[in-house]
Image (tube, grey):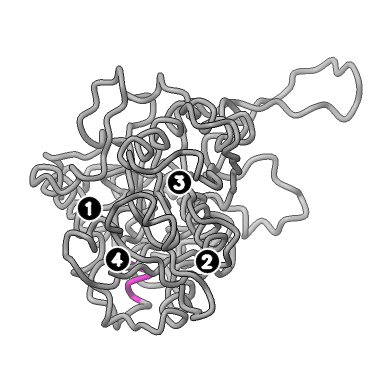
Amino acid sequence: MANDLLRDVYVVDAVRTPVGKYGGALAGVRPDDLAALVVRSLVDRAPELDPVRIDDVVFGNANGAGEENRNVARMAVLLAGLPVTVPGVTVNRLCASGLEAVVHAARAIAVGDASVIVAGGVESMSRAPWVLPKSDRPFPAGHQQLYSTTLGWRLVNPKMPPQWTVSLGEGAEQIADRHGITREQQDAYALASHEKAARAWKDGRYDAEVVPVEGVDLARDETIRDNTSLEALARLKPAFRTGDGTVTAGNSSPLNDGAAALLLTDEEGLRATGREPLARIRASAVTGIEPNLFGLGPVEAVRRALARAGRSFADLSVVELNEAFAAQVLGCLAEWPELDPAVVNPRGGAIAIGHPLGASGARLAGAVAHQLAAAGTGTGLAALCIGVGQGQALVLER
């Protein structure tokens, strides 16, 4: 971490599942089983580490209303066959929950409260349950309304200003309006995301981090479209605004299922693994913004994280910025003129790979760590926008 009084925190390893599409190959797998899979995979890949040494398991999850059973981290510990003495805690910062788990774990190690922690995230948007609110009165005679917990606002407090509670897609439209981002620019960005992701998979650039899901025929991320084109994307209708809308299903991230996890240690824990680390965690930041402009949340978070790390945009060799919407990414890039766009999401982003909410932050942090390790040196950054108006960023180095 940036403060010299704190312990260094190392990313020893990082794994993730292939990302499944909504109702797709991973729809039959419970989220607690997905979480257990990546936890077990990390332990198996560090055979010199006695699992008893794991001080905590921290997982991000944006839902928690269903098979996650409220604390999916503890469920993962038990299902993965770790010693029952290993605890687990679940954190929720919506779209950045997985990154919040990494930051939470790194902070505990940095201050000496832990030596070895598994941090990650999981989401099954396919299996997200419907919820039925309790009636204000006993024995209601009329029909009751179910609410989907898959994505977005639900059971909204009427005290919330209506301009804050617009859909995520409408928020992306507002960012496009604010920065003059056209439909053509968004579609071109989306196409590039698919092309980069497909090329990265073909070149084996994900081989070091993606672990298979037993019993599931899914060799790579399920929502990558190799054969899409600008013409095909242009035929899609606006999904959130009629008439002059520019945000479509094609230039937005899909709904997804998946899990990711990282093994974090201090110096002592690193020696216990017998491994060379992928990267070191340098600094982090989280900030708030108007809820409807959530997509611009990373703008200030990234600036603060870089400042805390004593680094600048020019120092960055790789940036993994979550692609909730093409408009959101382009809006952030417009506010970071110092950043070279060529270093952003070089292996594709969430528009192609997918965005399983609670897992995405851990996927991005792991992706940065693996890319820094492959390069042998450099400074990297992972960042996400967050529904209801937040942004979070993490700086890593090697």
Q: CA distance from mark 3 to mark 2?
A: 17 Å
Q: Which mark is residue 110?
A: 2
User: Would you name the residue on which mark 1 appears?
Assistant: 348
Q: Give the amino acid at mark 3.
A: Gly
Give the label, 1 or 2, closer to the camera: 2
Give the label, 4 or 1, closer to the camera: 4
Q: Give the amino acid at mark 4.
A: Val
Q: Which residues are magenta?
A: 330-334
Q: CA distance from mark 2 to mark 4?
A: 23 Å
Q: CA distance from mark 4 to mark 1?
A: 11 Å
Tell which circle, 4 or 1, labels the residue nearer the N-terminal end: 4
Q: Is 55 on the left-hand or right-hand side of 143?
A: left
Please state which of residues 53 and 321 is positioned toward the viewer in this rendering: 53
Q: Is 99 on the left-hand or right-hand side of 132?
A: left
Which residue is at 36% across, 56% downward?
Answer: 271
Tell which circle, 1 or 2, labels the residue nearer the N-terminal end: 2
Give the label, 3 or 2, closer to the camera: 2
Q: Position of residue 367 (x, y in %)?
A: 29, 54
Give the label, 2 or 4, closer to the camera: 2
Name the image quarter holding the C terminus: bottom left
Per the image, label 2 sits on a secondary structure element best described as: helix
